[in-house]
Amino acid sequence: MNTITVKLCLGTACYVMGSSHLQDLVDIIPDRFGDRVVIAGHNCLNLCTSNGEHAESPYVKIDDEIISNATIEKVLDHIEKKL
Amino acid sequence: MFIDIDCTQQKKYDQNAYGDYFLSSRNKDTGKLAAVLSDGLGSGIKANILSCMTATMLLKFIEADADIQSVCEIVMNALPVCRVRKISYATFSAFDCNDEGFARIVEEGNPQFVWVREGEVMDAVARVVTSATFPNRHMQIYNIKLELGDRLIFCSDGVTQAGLGSPALKLGLRREGLIEFLLKKLQDQPDISSRDLAKLIVNCAKGNEVDKKARDDISAVSIYCRQPRESLIFTGPPYHADKDNACAYVFKRFTGKKAICGGTTANILARELHIPVEAQILTNAGSLPPVSKMKGVDLVTEGILTLTRACEYLEETEAVTHNDAAGQLVKFFLESDCINFMVGAKLNQAHYDPNMPIEIEIRKNIIKKIAKLLETKYIKTVNIKYI
């Protein structure tokens, strides 16, 4: 069974733009997907600086896929599709 | 030699203002430390005004190296006269010391200070000077030489008279009780910080009071001559990326305690030093990003938001312990004597996006603010280097 890794960026820009709320995924993901999805925080994914467009925080990385303007629904949708 | 000084206070149980007042300052250029503890007549606002005036005037005069005897006369004459008691009164203990340990102490009315060296109480010989205008007031003047490891304790009579009239302590804790308590604590914890020792003394005094209610204002000032505890905080990426490696190695070679404040900064150090930053454990630690872990680094936090919050905590008047990342950073600061900041001057453009729901402070400004607080309110030595 493949596991999916979800990384939440908790750097300043992402945190202010909404990743503080994304931390709820820590409870939601195991409830919904069990151990098929591993979730972890990241101190900074360096996406806000490298991405030119700065208005796309918060960022979440699902395996190698970057989700910009991430919301709980958006992250859950992506996981559903991948599974 | 670094002089670690801190004061803890407890106000009288039925008052909303502290009747004792403590002030201290450290001259950055000369290394001279000056401190005053004053106990105003009575309690509450009136005592607060008397002790505040006394401490403020004395500190200014001591900083200016004025003749202590004439200074005391000026201060005593300047105090307003109490309408009830027809006297003007605030006792005081004034202390100054240079960085070689030559200390001068003047006491008037406060309990005699306690000087501890290697677990024993030292005798200090006083020169007694009587006030020209107030013949009932006598100043004890001491000139002593402090050595590494020495401790001095100053307190208001709220400590020595704690428990007065209780069955266990008919005459209160007294100076003997304080000494006994101190020597025991120092035996148990020889390296205890001034901050913690002052807290313990106030708690001991309060604990001895009937019903644990402070019947008077209680203040304890602790002074500890120690090797300075150095710390380094690296925050913000260097302005020129080609300096990343050199800065990372300065950080690596530093021998004191180390902290990183900033996600990108932590990533740079992880890359240059080949030490992984462990993913943060997502726990509900207040409204700040959580701390990360990195081998060899004592604390890793997010940058601006945490620094801004830490600054707010440092500004608080009551010493409250906070468990979030900023609270841990404040603890890190307060457990150091000499705090070095390495501040990267590079800005993250994303922080200044007009869509940001909150205003994000510029790193340089927030560090300056923190440094000022640490120097003036917490009497720390602070160095800032912009990179």
Image (cartoon, coloured by chain):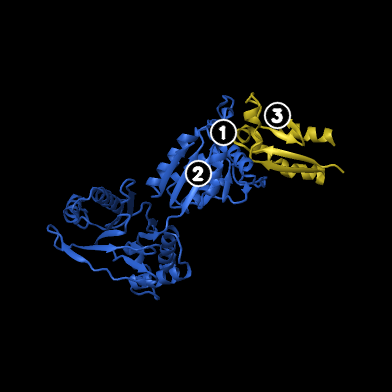
Chain colours: A yellow, B blue
Mark toward the viewer: 1 or 2: 1
Q: Residue at x 64, y 23 (%)?
A: A53
Sort mark 2 into few (<14), some (14-19) or many (20+) by Cα contacts within 10 Å.
many
Residue at the far right in the pictured view: A1
Chain letter of the residue carrying label 3: A
Mark 2 falls on what kind of element? helix
Q: Are marks 1 and 2 on the same chain?
A: yes
The N terminus of chain B, quarter of image: bottom left
Q: Are marks 1 and 2 in contact (CB under 8 Å)?
A: no
Question: What is the three-letter code of the residue carrying label 1?
Answer: Asp
Mark 1 = which residue?
B242
Residue in front for this viewpoint, A6 or A31: A6
Picture quadrant where residue B200 is located: bottom left
* Direction from residue B2 to residue A76 in the image, left or right: right
Mark 2 = which residue?
B310
Chain letter of the residue carrying label 1: B
Residue in front for this viewpoint, A30 or B194: B194
Locate residue A49, reporting x and y percent: 62, 29
Mark 3 = which residue?
A68
* Direction from residue B139 to residue B45 in the image, left or right: right
Picture quadrant where residue B201 is located: bottom left
Residue A7 numbered tag? none
Sort mark 1 into few (<14), some (14-19) or many (20+) by Cα contacts within 10 Å.
few
Q: Residue at x 12, y 58 (%)?
A: B132
Locate residue B227, reporting x and y percent: 42, 58
Say if residue B172 shows up in the picture: no
* Real-space Cα separation, disc 3 to disc 2, in angstroms: 30 Å
Question: What is the three-letter code of the residue carrying label 3?
Answer: Ser
Question: What is the three-letter code of the residue carrying label 2?
Answer: Ala
* Real-space Cα separation, disc 3 to disc 1, in angstroms: 29 Å
